[in-house]
Image (tube, rainbow, N blue to C red):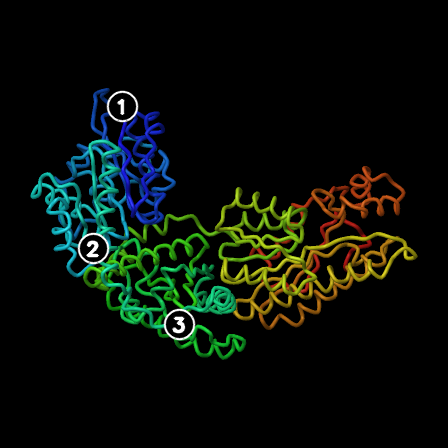
Amino acid sequence: MNTRKEFKQVSYLWDDAKAATMAGDEVALLIYRSNLLGADLRLTNYGGGNTSCKAMAKDPLTGEDTEVMWVKGSGGDLGTLKASGLAALYVNRLRSLKNVYRGIEQEDEMVDLFNHCIFDLASKAPSIDTPLHGFLPFKHIDHLHPDAAIAIAAAKDGKRITQELFKGTIGWVDWQRPGFDLGLQLKACLDENPGIRGIMLGSHGLFTWGDTAYESYINTLEVIEACATYIEDAVAKNKTVFGGAKMQSLPEEQRKAQAAALAPLLRGFCSSGNRMVGHFTDDERVLDFINSKDLDRLAPMGTSCPDHFLRTKISPLVLPLAADADLNDMAAIKEKLAPVFDAYRTMYATYYNNCKHPNSPAMRDANPVVILYPGVGMFTFAANKQTARVAAEFYINAINVMRGAEAISSYTSLPHQEAFNIEYWLLEEAKLQRMPKPKALSGRVALVTGSAGGIGKAIARKFAEEGACIVVNDNDAERLSIAKEYFLQQFGKDVCTTVLLDVTNREAIEKAYTTAALAFGGVDIVVNCAGLSISKPIEEHTDKDWDLLYDVLVKGQFAVTQEGVSIMRKQGMGGDVLNIVSKNALVSGPNNAGYGSAKAAQLHLSRLNAAELGADRIRVNVVNPDAVISDSKIWAGAWAEGRAKAYGVKVEDLPAFYAKRTLLNEIINPSDIADACFAFVGGLLNKSTGNVLNVDGGIAMAFVR
């Protein structure tokens, strides 16, 4: 049994009992070790780093034992790695590629040759880091991007510090883009320094190893612990971080308010080329950096580790706004920030043009990914929420690196040409081209009122399936809690957020949009679906009934739309408002004066909004359902009894009754309404507004014309 080690700077997660169940299965132990290392963001970033093991296996062609290397494949993540994410290669074939290697100028051609070394034809495609593992003789190898190690690797005196700190037991290889030649350099470093326990890669990361999975794991933790302790001791002696504070942060509530107010405007700027989704954080590490005296010096330098700047761009944009700036006049703020974004795009284009090669891919989006707002926090924008969130995590890692490097020496970033050679590497471009095409609603954010059940839940689910981020809400906390669990399980935290929302309460509406702005940067689609029904003869209708119907259905629709339009105008990207009304807006029926007239008001309000908002490219359309009984809160109450009474049928016979009165003789389900909503926003009807789409099985009296 292994003796449990004590660490202060990293997490020791190894479970002897669990590992014992994998004894003799080196691949299983590799996955276990990888998951433990990936669970601690101080050790490596999402999608960053790679691990490997070498073991004997039966050659399927000869039946003889042969050495095979299993290594994290291209595009995988250590924290979630499974066997299907590994590439398996013949070690002897991989090493024999040295015989055909033509030199660093033709290095990229070696990647295609990796395919000739594959042992398991069903395995993941090998990554560019494969030879870095293949040429080292050790059974288990970890290549990570720990903040503490990169801080030393990116320090001006990193090589000297590494030598002194580890007394020669950690080798050093100067910065070079990952690839075949770097693998050869790692082997040369080991040959020149036999007995070392690892190698530091300048400005990049760390290689460590062991003869068993556990030995490699412990070796990795011990080296990173030593780096982190060295840095923290230096920070304690210096007593100031980043030159000390230049300003103080706003209180948390004010930070969130400023961020929510500004996020849609920033999202609009960052979406000038492609629609982006946002993420906001006011993590303490971020605040220490953006409030510091050294911000203006360090921020333009950019990051060092290639994994960092691939996700955060060459440098962030720092907003020239006071933390407590008055954001009520968005036109003035927009006018002030427009030249700042223009300057960033010009800087990026200059970087591209100065560094490009004849065969470089075309310049990508020139907008910033990371935006720093001193005193408030950090925004990140990307094609989807996960990428935006991960970009924020990577920039926090970069902040940690700068903090450590500055504490022990001075921080150095990669030269622009080296950064460009990574960012616009043809192999990286090929990886981007292999990514799945975006779904119809990718990059869109939708707020669907009443989305914890019935029609609203079906719409939210449909939009999420089509790539949208969803703000799920309801006025029933218990119902919302159930919906939250469902959406998180189905789609994950990067697709949905939840908020309690009563559409008759203006503060609750504002809070819902604040939630949308902080979680995703704004909103593109507003679906007014929250509703209720009251069916009574005219003599039984009360003022309370009437007011409730009009407050929820009419005033609620107006208020939710009004707040949503305010955000859409800040973004300047247009948008969609969908109002779930009813065939009762068009058809006169018994015992329905309050509900039917409120629905008619909803319908005409939609027309009025469509006429007014067209200049903003905000489209307003209506879906008219009828008799959607499944999972409906409305039909669980007195409404069903009232309608059954009005039509002289039993409650349980209502679905069949409603179906028989339609031209198509169809029962209408929540998913049918969701499909109709998607038809409006999915891209095929972008030039349609002010329309009414009936989804009722065909009721002639409800025909609009």
User: What is the three-letter code of the residue carrying label 2?
Assistant: Ile
User: What is the three-letter code of the residue carrying label 1?
Assistant: Pro
Q: Is residue 119 left or right of residue 269?
A: left
Q: Position of residue 144 (x, y in %)?
A: 26, 46
Q: Secondary structure at mark 2?
A: helix
User: What is the three-letter code of the residue carrying label 3?
Assistant: Leu
* Mark 1–mark 3 CB contact (< 8 Å): no
* Mark 3–mark 2 CB contact (< 8 Å): no
Q: Position of residue 444 (x, y in %)?
A: 52, 58
Q: Secondary structure at mark 3?
A: loop
Q: Position of residue 330 (x, y in %)?
A: 52, 75
Q: CA distance from mark 2 to mark 1?
A: 45 Å
Dot 3 alpha-carbon crowd within 10 angstroms: few under 14, some 14 to 19, many 20 or more: some
Image quadrant where residue 78 sits: top left
- Residue 319, numbered circle: 3
Label 2 vs label 1, nearer the camera = 2
Which residue is identified by label 2? Answer: 152
The earlier-in-sequence mark between 2 and 1 is 1
Q: Secondary structure at mark 1?
A: loop
Quadrant that contains the C terminus: bottom right
- Name the residue furthest top: 63
The earlier-in-sequence mark between 3 and 2 is 2
- Name the residue furthest left: 192
The earlier-in-sequence mark between 1 and 3 is 1
* Residue 503 visible in the shown view: yes
